[in-house]
Amino acid sequence: MAYSFSSSEGLPPMNKLKIFAGNSNLPLAREICGQLAVPLGSAKVRNFSDGEIMVEVGENVRGRDVYVIQSTCAPTNNNLMELLVMCDALKRASAERITAVIPYFGYARQDRKVAPRTPITSKLVADLITTAGADRVLSMDLHAGQIQGFFNIPVDHLYAAPVILEDISSRFRGKVVVVSPDAGGTERARAFAKRLDAGLAIIDKRRSGPNVSEVMHIIGDVVGKPCVIVDDMIDTAGTLCQAAKALQSEGASEIYACATHAVLSGPALERINESCLQEVLVTNSIPTDGKLKDCSKLRILSVAELLAEAIRRIHGDESVSSLFC
């Protein structure tokens, strides 16, 4: 999954490109703008005293190709509303095209009815974003691939795998075992293992409730081998730490983990600190800098270059999928 950047010759003038950001991940937005050599657009995004979102775009966007960078991470509802209100403001300001750049797409775990009388929130959020005025969406490592079909507008789905794989391959010269923490992540783990020419293991678990899991047994050979647990997100870290404990019990020599989205809610940092994990590799799709002081095992990789190149290609009507060829 190595990716390569092509020449920008023949692309439309970059002065037609405008990038704005909400408050969810301003450091990532600034890094993306630095990669593109485009200034971050002027916009005031703040709250009224009663908590309502207020947006005021501070520059002309008429006829421009506009990108709004906003992860819908915690505080999820506030960040989602910022995105919706920004899209509405830009639409009413006559932007030619609005692309919602959502490095982390929240509400994605409720992507189907798992019990009677439950919602499908990922579809609901997709409809809200479309109604607010977005013409297309750029996201990364959606919790379920079918969420792309919940939108009635184009969706460009990126993968952080090339960035993570490059780091892993540079550090592990010998054979490693890529581990899926559950059956649902097998396809992702298999893709990693293929690129790394590594072994594959799967942890079979039974979940007794939301954010609660119980490890059952391991499928695959991990005895005496370094293992890398691969997932799309780390929320409370319950699944991750139980998986690491199971691998240790089976005789794994070293245990690492990597994930795209560092949600890290509730007792996640405490659990990681107390676990047998040597290191947890995550990206900056969600801001985590403030948590580094509480968890020395975290290491962050930037996906700014990847997102910037995707924006450049969308702006120039170039292929985005070729990034992952």
Image (cartoon, helix red, strand yellow):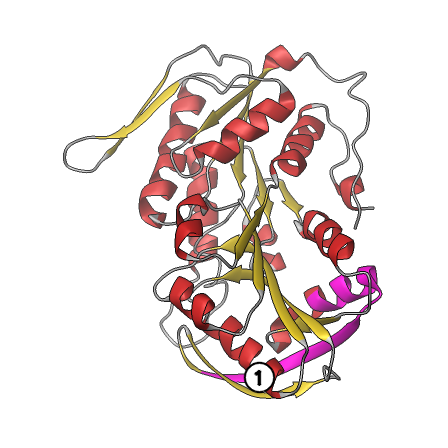
- Crowd band around label 1 with a 10 angstrom C-alpha radius: few (<14), some (14–19), many (20+): some
Q: Is residue 18 left or right of residue 289?
A: right
Residue appearing at x 73%, y 81% in the figure: 224
Residue 194 location, quadrant:
bottom right
Q: Is residue 287 visible?
A: yes
Q: Is residue 119 visible?
A: no
Q: Position of residue 284 (x, y in %)?
A: 53, 44
Q: Is residue 75 left or right of residue 253?
A: left
| Vertical order, 313 against 197 (above or below) | above
Q: Position of residue 15 (x, y in %)?
A: 61, 11
Residue appearing at x 46%, y 37% in the figure: 70
Residue type, label 1: Ala
Q: Is residue 153 left or right of residue 6?
A: left
| Vertical order, 322 against 245 (above or below) | above
Q: Position of residue 22 (x, y in %)?
A: 40, 32
Q: Which residue is mark 1?
A: 246
Pick the residue in front: 55 or 307: 307
Q: Position of residue 241 (x, y in %)?
A: 50, 74
User: Residue pushed farthest left?
Assistant: 49
Residue 121 location, quadrant:
bottom left
Pick the residue in front: 187 or 263: 263
Pick the residue in front: 215 or 92: 215
| Vertical order, 42 against 88 (above or below) | above
SS for tag 1?
helix
Image: magenta residue range: 189-207
Pick the residue in front: 151 or 41: 41
Residue appearing at x 81%, y 28% in the figure: 6
